[in-house]
Amino acid sequence: MFLHDAATKILKRKVGNGGRQPVADYIQSLAIKYFDDRAVLTTDSQHVRMIELTLTAQTEHPDPSYSTNDGYRTFILRSRVTPRNLR
């Protein structure tokens, strides 16, 4: 289970009975979308066949020559995965 702390911009992961451990810093957002077998968005967990993860990260320090976003450069990583146990 993942938790994004927007105040500290830290992505954390909980494993087993332990506490949440940091996975990544400077994360602006984490979005998860679920799709059925026709690649249509779904909220029904029984029909999920593909998951899209979108992670937006920013640089640790602002770039003085970059005026957008208060000088912080951002990077978006997006991936669609098909878990083998959902086929």
Image (cartoon, rainbow, N blue to C red):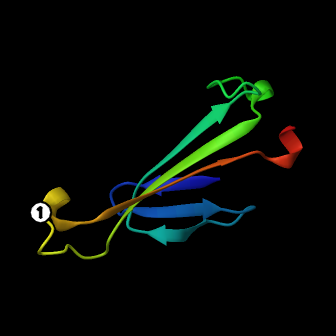
| Pick the front one: 17 or 87 | 87
Q: Vertically, is 86 above or below 61?
A: above
In-image side of 18 versus 58 (left or right): right
Residue 45 spot, x, y in % from top left: 74, 29
Residue sitting at 64 percent across and 24 percent down?
Answer: 40
The quadrant of the picture occupied by the C terminus is top right
Q: How many marks?
A: 1
Q: Which residue is mark 1?
A: 67
Q: Quadrant of residue 68?
A: bottom left
Residue 49 spot, x, y in % from top left: 77, 34
| Pick the front one: 43 or 40 | 40
Residue sitting at 75 percent across and 61 percent down?
Answer: 16
Q: Vertically, is 42 above or below 83?
A: above
Residue sitting at 61 percent across and 26 percent down?
Answer: 41
Q: Vertically, is 40 above or below 63?
A: above
Q: Vertically, is 59 above or below 15?
A: below
Badge 1 density bin: few <14, some 14–19, many ≥20, Cα 10 Å: few
Q: Quadrant of residue 6?
A: bottom left
Residue 86 spot, x, y in % from top left: 84, 39
In-image side of 80 versus 12 (left or right): right
Q: Amino acid at mark 1?
A: Ser
| Pick the front one: 40 or 10 | 40
In-image side of 17 versus 2 (left or right): right
Q: Quadrant of residue 38?
A: top right
Q: Secondary structure at mark 1?
A: loop
Residue sitting at 50 percent across and 69 percent down?
Answer: 24
